[in-house]
């Protein structure tokens, strides 16, 4: 075997290895809780591609991913989990266990029967935010924004270059993809915060009586945000009546979606 043949074989091997490392694959698995019960309605997110799927009623899921992609598993009232896609291209069925977050037992109170009057019902089902009550009573100002590192923007990096100033860190953040990942993470964090805000103020029974399965409430709230963006506008304004009004408009759409795509 001469040197040229050896180089060709080496190149072919490297090509095969590279193709294996960077080829897309379908990752399947099952999600359970710490007692072994299957968990349906778990949101699985490919943090690299932002692709999202939900586990079915048996906890089974399937999602496309590349090697080294991070898969994140999220469900209300459970600690989130992450798993890296293996680099050898061979992923046996993933077994993911989510651990439930302990809940404090709140005050027991008598819940009045809903009247059908949205403004009155919103006061009935709304859970009291004691921190907000204290702020209003004492006159404390609202916290200003969130303490976050600001992602690099193209214009904020390129414009200074025209003036002879190079933002090395900003340039690195753009090229490496860090800025894009930060923005994606911030969007995800804001979404989860808004879903939690709604769920902390409206009891599950309210959704269940409207025809939303208990394990799909979080999914429904996220659906209402996309179907009626004004819902999220009201969440940001902390306007519960407005949230409920717009959210109710999306209930028939979501129920129809459930019938077409049962899990």
Image (spheres, rainbow, N blue to C red):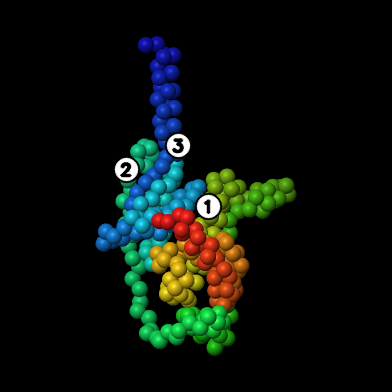
Q: Secondary structure at mark 1?
A: helix
Residue at (55%, 79%) from the top-left corner?
118
Where residue 2 sits in the image (x, y, percent)?
40, 11
Q: CA distance from mark 2 to mark 1?
A: 28 Å
* In the displayed structure image, the side of residue 128 where residue 55 appears, left or right: left
Where residue 215 sits in the image (x, y, percent)?
40, 64
Extreme top residue here? 2
Count every numbered label the image shows and give the total. Answer: 3
Q: Sequence-wise, which precedes: disc 3 or disc 1?
A: 3
Q: Dot 3: few (<14), some (14–19), or many (≥20) neighbours within 10 Å?
A: some
Q: Sequence-wise, which precedes: disc 2 or disc 3?
A: 3
Where residue 42 sits in the image (x, y, percent)?
40, 58
Looking at the image, residue 234 lies above or below residue 56? below
The residue to which callout 2 is attached is: 92
The residue to which callout 3 is attached is: 22
Nearer to me, 176 or 249: 249
The residue to which callout 1 is attached is: 181
Q: Sequence-wise, which precedes: disc 2 or disc 1?
A: 2
Looking at the image, residue 200 lies above or below residue 65? below
């Amino acid at each position: 075997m001469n040197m040229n043949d050896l180089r060709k074989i080496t190149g072919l091997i490297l090509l095969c290895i590279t193709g294996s490392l960077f080829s897309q694959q379908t990752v399947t698995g099952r999600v359970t809780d710490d007692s072994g019960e299957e968990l349906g309605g778990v949101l699985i997110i490919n943090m690299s591609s932002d692709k999202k799927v939900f586990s079915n009623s048996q906890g089974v899921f399937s999602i496309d991913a590349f090697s080294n992609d991070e898969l994140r598993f999220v469900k209300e009232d459970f600690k989130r989990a992450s798993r890296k896609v293996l680099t050898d291209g061979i992923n046996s069925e993933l077994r993911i266990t989510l651990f439930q977050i302990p809940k404090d037992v709140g005050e027991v109170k008598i819940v009045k029967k809903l009247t059908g009057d949205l403004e009155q019902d919103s006061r009935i089902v709304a859970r009291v935010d004691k921190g907000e009550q204290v702020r209003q009573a004492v006159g404390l100002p609202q916290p200003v924004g969130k303490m976050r590192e600001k992602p690099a923007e193209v214009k904020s990096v390129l414009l200074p270059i025209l003036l002879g100033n190079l933002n090395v860190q900003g340039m690195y953040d753009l090229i490496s993809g860090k800025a894009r990942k930060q923005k994606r993470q911030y969007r995800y964090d804001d979404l989860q915060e808004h879903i939690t805000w709604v769920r902390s103020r409206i009891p599950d029974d309210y959704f269940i009586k409207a025809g939303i399965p208990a394990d799909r409430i979080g999914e429904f709230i996220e659906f209402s945000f996309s179907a009626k963006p004004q819902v999220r506008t009201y969440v940001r304004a902390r306007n519960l009546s407005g949230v409920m009004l717009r959210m109710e408009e999306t209930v028939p759409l979501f129920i129809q979606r459930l019938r077409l795509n049962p899990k």
